[in-house]
Amino acid sequence: MTSSDQDASQATPAPGATPPPPPLAAEVFGAALPRAIAYVDRLAGDGVTRGLIGPREVPRLWERHVLNSAAVAEAVPAGARVVDVGSGAGLPGIPLGLARPDVVLTLVEPMARRVDFLTEAVAELGTGWRVVRGRAEERSVVTAVGPVDVVTARAVAPLPRLVSWCRGLLRPGASLVALVGARALAELPGMLAELEAAGMQDVHPRAVGAEWGDAATTVVVMTRGRR
Ligand SMILES: C[S@@+](CC[C@H](N)C(=O)[O-])C[C@H]1O[C@@H](n2cnc3c(N)ncnc32)[C@H](O)[C@@H]1O
């Protein structure tokens, strides 16, 4: 291999290879960076072979999935009890928990295949987070998880449905922080009345990770009212 071949191979990872962490990752994850790297390796390996992550997502795992998820931390108060609903392969919950070791995290997911992946990922990371199998609205899940300070969710359901599923998990005054796509953001004004009728207050979009380039995103934040 010539030196120019070597430079090229370092700049462009082989197809399917785990992408190296961008410099921002060290800043975001601090001492948890080795765990974040292990998690990205798992997403790119088992996550792809088990059909939880599309192979075409691998080159952008850091920016579009892991850092983008960690950006949610900006909307989560210190020491919060957090439940990530519909966690799938652990997004946004696992990057959030790695970036914010102060939060008390539970991952809720109904699909067995995904629960197995989450359970193995949490065991490898050694973080002690709980993984609960079930649907957010099921009594057994509400009983197991209890009222929390923050519910996070990414790409789980349209906001009014998500609110109806998560209501039992949110203590009065708790926040729902939803990572949603551009379409849901555009539709937010038309949903406000329905969300408020469902007992949610102060519904608003919030830019997070604003200085993070491709990892910047917008979340929808709302608070459960007292009634
Ligand atoms: C499109 S996936 C998103 C997974 C992950 N949040 C992500 O962003 O990669 C939606 C997830 O929500 C889960 N889900 C669907 N209905 C649910 C419910 N009622 N309660 C909790 N999770 C649910 C699905 O099993 C699935 O894992």
Image (spheres, rainbow, N blue to C red):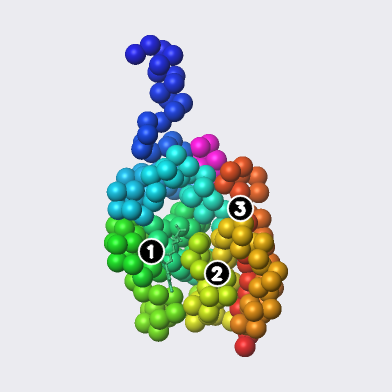
Q: Residue 105, located in which quarter of the rendered image?
A: bottom left
Callout 1–callout 3 Cβ contact below 8 Å? no
Q: Which residue is mark 3?
A: 217
Q: Residue 187: percent from the left, percent from the top?
A: 65, 66
Other-residue count near label 2 (Cα within 10 Å), few / some / many at <14 / 14–19 / ≥20? few
Extreme residue in the bottom direction: 227
Other-residue count near label 3 (Cα within 10 Å), few / some / many at <14 / 14–19 / ≥20? many
Q: Residue 56: percent from the left, percent from the top?
A: 42, 43
* Disc 1/disc 3 C-alpha distance (Å): 25 Å
Q: Is residue 10 magenta?
A: no
Q: Which residue is mark 1?
A: 129
Other-residue count near label 1 (Cα within 10 Å), few / some / many at <14 / 14–19 / ≥20? some
Residue located at (66% from left, 67% from top): 188
Ligand 1 has an atom within 8 Å of the beta carbon of the residue at disc 3: no
Q: Is residue 20 above or below residue 147?
A: above
Q: Which residue type does callout 1 highlight? A: Trp
Q: Quadrant of ligand 1?
A: bottom left
Q: Which residue is mark 2?
A: 158
Residue located at (40% from left, 81% from top): 138
Q: Which residue type does callout 2 highlight? A: Pro
Is the stretch drawn in magenta largely helix, strand or loop?
Answer: helix
Is disc 3 placed on a helix, strand or loop?
strand
The residue lying toward the viewer, choosing from 6 and 193, is: 193
Q: Which residues are magenta?
A: 22-28
Give the mark, 1 or 3, whose residue is nearer the N terminus: 1
Q: Nearer the viewer, mark 2 or mark 3?
A: 2
Left/right placement of residue 50 relative to residue 199 reads left
Q: Residue 145, located in which quarter of the rendered image?
A: bottom left
* Disc 1/disc 2 C-alpha distance (Å): 27 Å
Q: Which residue type does callout 3 highlight? A: Thr
Give the mark, 1 or 2, whose residue is nearer the N terminus: 1
